[in-house]
Image (tube, helix red, strand yellow):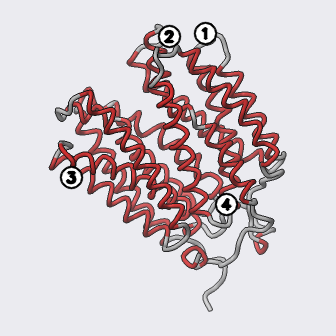
Amino acid sequence: MAALQEPTGHAPSGPAPSHAALGASLLIGATGLLVLGVQPLLYGSYVHEGRIGEASLGLLAAIEIAAIALGSTGGIALLARIPARVVALAGIAITIAANLLPALVPLLLARAISGTGGGLLVGVAAGAIARARGLNAAAAAFLFLQAASQYVILQWFASAAAPGSSADIQRALAVIAALTALALPLAPARLAAPVHAEEAAATGAIPRSGWIGLAASALLVGAVVGIWAYMGLWLEARGIAPERIAPMLTASMVGQMAGALVAIAVGERGHAGAKAIITGLGLIAIVALLFLRGADGAFGWSLIVGYGFVWMILTPALTGLLLEADPTRHSLPFAASAQLMGAAILPTAAGMLIERQGIDTVLITCSAAIILGLALICAALGLRPRLYPAT
């Protein structure tokens, strides 16, 4: 962890979670994000059932993802006061109740409540990652669990003989949340925010470099998710047959899982900020090649798969970046919240450009946001505080 020890060289006070406790926490957090894997099917069912119009789907997605982000922030705050298992149990209970609410409850409210419950679960995972010894590897493992679980549930529903109703999908989410309670005994008893022993008397305020790092994370993840969200529409606009688009996107999800595994293997080796910058530039290069060469043939497939692969190496590097930019570690637990908020806001804002400017503008705008995020990374690293004077 040489790259992460440059500012301080100290681990967070208190014991780090065991492998079993960390795994249970990551599993709990992945359950909170499971809805993202079935959003296309769930939201499509809402439209077919007349519960919402197509024009409002972007707002619905933004509200649900923002609720997850805010719930995660609330969960992190609760971890300082009550046991982690209680926070997780509350998240499970809220998720179950929200997905079993009758259709008479306003849809936006129901999904906001469900998102809040899921956010509490994500908060438990974020707290465990912030205390983990291998920060980058833990963040990458969380991403792998997210991608794998979302892929499995999406494929399970997509392969069903008959498309399920929204109630069927929500019941499945409720059942999976209930089964997650089996992991509670393995979860850490407490996950208070990590602090360094030499900072025990500090106020705990996030330094400016930490805030800039969080902003960079929000921009980068929001831009990457925005490109992914509209990739199918862009491929269709570029003349790719609809029956070929779904397999290409599925292959990209496999690339995501492979990228997360590589990030786990790389772990703490190298500077996280440098990895984030290199992979961010790689994503911009992939988008540029898609514009220049198109997505036809084996080369197009390799670009789509490569996008998912590089994406999953970039995202865990952003967690390590926060430690490099903020040696106090106060910003670390909020990494997931910032990334989710970016994923809620940026794709929705970019989608507003489609009617006026076209689908190409969405990808160009998100690529510009990646460049801005990379600039913020450089600013965060340049402003990082030193806990000790140079010797």
Residue 208 is at least partly visible in this image: no
Q: CA distance from mark 3 to mark 4?
A: 39 Å
Q: Position of residue 301 (x, y in %)?
A: 26, 46
Label 2 and label 3: CA atoms lie apart by 40 Å
Residue identified by numbered label 1: 103
| Left/right of residue 163 with respect to residue 167 in the rendered view | left
SS class, disc 3: helix
Q: Is residue 38 visible?
A: yes
Q: Residue 236: where, in percent of width, then height? A: 23, 31
Q: Which sits earlier in the primary sequence, circle 3 or circle 1?
A: 1
Mark 1 or 4 closer to N-term?
A: 1
> Hey, which quadrant is residue 331 in on the image?
bottom right
Badge 4 is on which residue?
330
The kind of residue on which mark 3 rests is Leu
**Mark 4, secondary structure of its residue:** loop
Look at discs 1 and 4 and give the one toward the viewer.
Answer: 1
